[in-house]
Image (cartoon, rainbow, N blue to C red):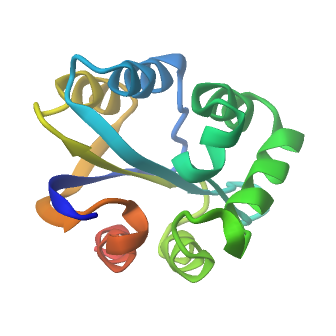
Amino acid sequence: MSRLVQLRVYRFDEGVNFDGGLISAIERLQLGGHGELLDALVVLRDAQTGEIDAVDMATGARGATVAALLDFRLDPRRRRAITERTLAEHTGGVPRAAIEATGDALAPGAAVLAVLHAGDPPDVLEEAVARSGGRAVATEPVEAGSLAAVAERVTAAASA
């Protein structure tokens, strides 16, 4: 079921370091009190290899999203496994083609974070994004229940 919610897409330039503050902000959104986090997606292009790495809530939810984000951030071997699971067509998350198109729009070392939320503006996330050197490239109301429903908007924002 779709409802009017906010899509926010953040872009991080080359050299981004997703520190614990960003993961903590996502965890706080998941726990409530700062609106309701409905979906999230991280796509980055590896600075050394140019490969696309990605994790989304649909994939992470099966293995505790915050734990998956920590593994994604800290362990290159787990990052690859999480990416393969995220790109698998059966996860119910953002379609593989949209993730790949989003990643193709990024320079090596750059990243995109897309979130879909309801309720209060996610100030805690905005602050963490700014501390990590990111910036909002899209903020718009959408009628959706998941990022999969607005995947083309995420890709367009990453390409801007």
Location of residue 132 by image quarter: top left
73 relative to 95, above or below = above
Location of residue 25 by image quarter: top left
Q: Residue at x 40, y 49 (%)?
A: 39
Quarter holding the N terminus? Answer: bottom left
146 relative to 132, above or below = below
Q: Residue at x 59, y 33 (%)?
A: 65
Quarter holding the C terminus? Answer: bottom left
Position of residue 44 in the picture relative to residue 88 (left or right):
left
Furthest toward the front, the residue is: 1
Furthest toward the right, the residue is: 77
Q: Nearer the viewer, residue 77 or 51?
A: 77
Location of residue 33 by image quarter: top left
Q: Residue at x 38, y 62 (%)?
A: 147
Q: Position of residue 26 (x, y in %)?
A: 41, 28
Position of residue 154 in the picture relative to residue 126 (left or right):
right
120 relative to 158, above or below = above
Position of residue 138 in the picture relative to residue 150 (left or right):
left
Q: Position of residue 124 (x, y in %)?
A: 25, 21
140 relative to 78, above or below = below
Q: How many marks?
A: 0
Q: Position of residue 72 (x, y in %)?
A: 70, 38
Q: Nearer the viewer, residue 155 or 151?
A: 151
Q: Residue at x 67, y 25 (%)?
A: 67
